[in-house]
Image (cartoon, rainbow, N blue to C red):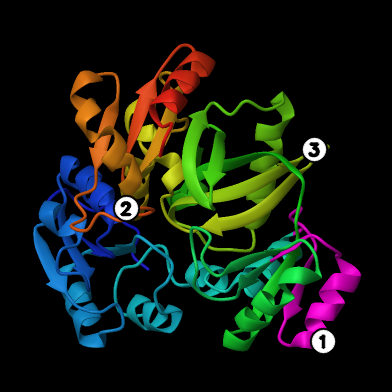
Amino acid sequence: MNLSNLKFGSTIGIIGGGQLGKMMAQSAQKMGYKVIVLDPDASCPCQFVAHQFINAAYDDQSALEKLGELSDVITYEFENISANQLQALASKYNIPQGYQAIQLLQDRLTEKQTLQESGSHIAPFVQLTDYDDLLNAIDTIGYPFIVKTRFGGYDGKGQVLVNDASNLNEVHQLIDAQECVAEQYLNLSKEVSLTVTIGTNNQITYFPLQENEHQNQILFKTIVPARTQNNIEQEARIEVNKIIKHIHFIGTFTVEFFIDQQNQLYVNEIAPRPHNSGHYSIEACDYSQFDTHIMAITGQALPQKVTLLKPAIMMNLLGRDLDLLEDQFVDHPEWHVHIYGKNTRKFNRKMGHLTVLTNDINDTEDKLLKQFEGR
């Protein structure tokens, strides 16, 4: 694995051409790098800011080989790619992130098992392969619990909340389709996340703790700094330090946490790449999560500290939010609006985000929530 500093003018290959790939590419280009993106969608957002576009499926081995031959370093924007193909690619080409994180984290069961082995504080869970396992989950962790498919699913897809026996048939359908994981449903007071970048020579850079709110399992807003008790951010860093002893990371990743009503912190899941809850960093920090990711994979030294320039609120813009608000963007210069450039607008599809910097988080939050009423 070659982690030497890449000179400007070198080429970064990105597997995945969605909004994360696009924002990676924008950070890479301002540092003087060229970008090639591979994506099966002929209209993917990243192609419009890349120097070259390979329109091919993620499992197209010849296309992946072509990306490797044309790139000085390869990264990826999401985790639903073949770990085996990534492993084969990493044996021939420069992929600092490697394949282990993908291999472990694209399977929710191995993710939970790895977290358990690391000593991380997680909610109790049970593997579900058949009806007997479901009965075991009811006996051992009790109602309510949430069932998630082992593979695939994001933004609430492939999940069922089980409050009682009334919706067990829905769980049976999930289990019939594929193995699942049942985990105890926590009575939450807050959700938070910590975005981290790891570079060469064990450099670790932490972003501020992020407070998140989801609606229908899709991120609705992120507030930074998180409004939590002072010890929570340090506890989150301790949990991250446990995790990185068991999983190889180079680049930016995010750990999502739950905080229950007793102020106990639980690791929920890990995204092994830049994350939606870190988008505020583009305007609110002296380095964005995409900047530090590119710095890490190109072998640059990371900043010892990422500074929050001003408190911020990031709001996701789904298709329905654009329907509601797009005519108002021109009247709000304080809104830093990012439109991703997806061709098809869908009701719950992430089409963009906006970030507002503020000295009064609560007042700004109230104003933004009023703007989003009726969505």
Q: Which residues are magenta?
A: 119-146
Residue 140 highlighted magenta (yes or no): yes
User: Considering depth in this image, is 259 or 168 the residue closer to the camera?
Assistant: 168
Q: Nearer the viewer, residue 164 or 259?
A: 164
Q: Nearer the viewer, mark 2 or mark 1?
A: 1
Element marked by disc 2: helix
Q: Quadrant of residue 237?
A: top right
In primary-sequence order, the first of circles 2 and 3 is: 2
Task: Name the image quarter holding residue 57.
Answer: bottom left
The residue pinned by badge 1 equals 132
Residues tagged 2 and 1 counted as in contact (Cβ below 8 A): no
Q: Position of residue 267 (x, y in %)?
A: 68, 52
Residue at point 32%, 62% (across, down):
75
Left or right position of 95 against 178: left
x 22%, y 47%: residue = 28
Spatial CA span between label 2 and label 1: 40 Å
Relative horizontal placement of residue 296, taking residue 115 as reference (left or right): left
**Of label 2 and label 1, which has the lower sequence position?**
2
Q: Which residue is mark 2?
A: 20
Residue 201 higher or lower than 43, as above or below:
above
Position of the C terminus, as image quadrant, is top left
- Helix, strand or loop under label 1: helix
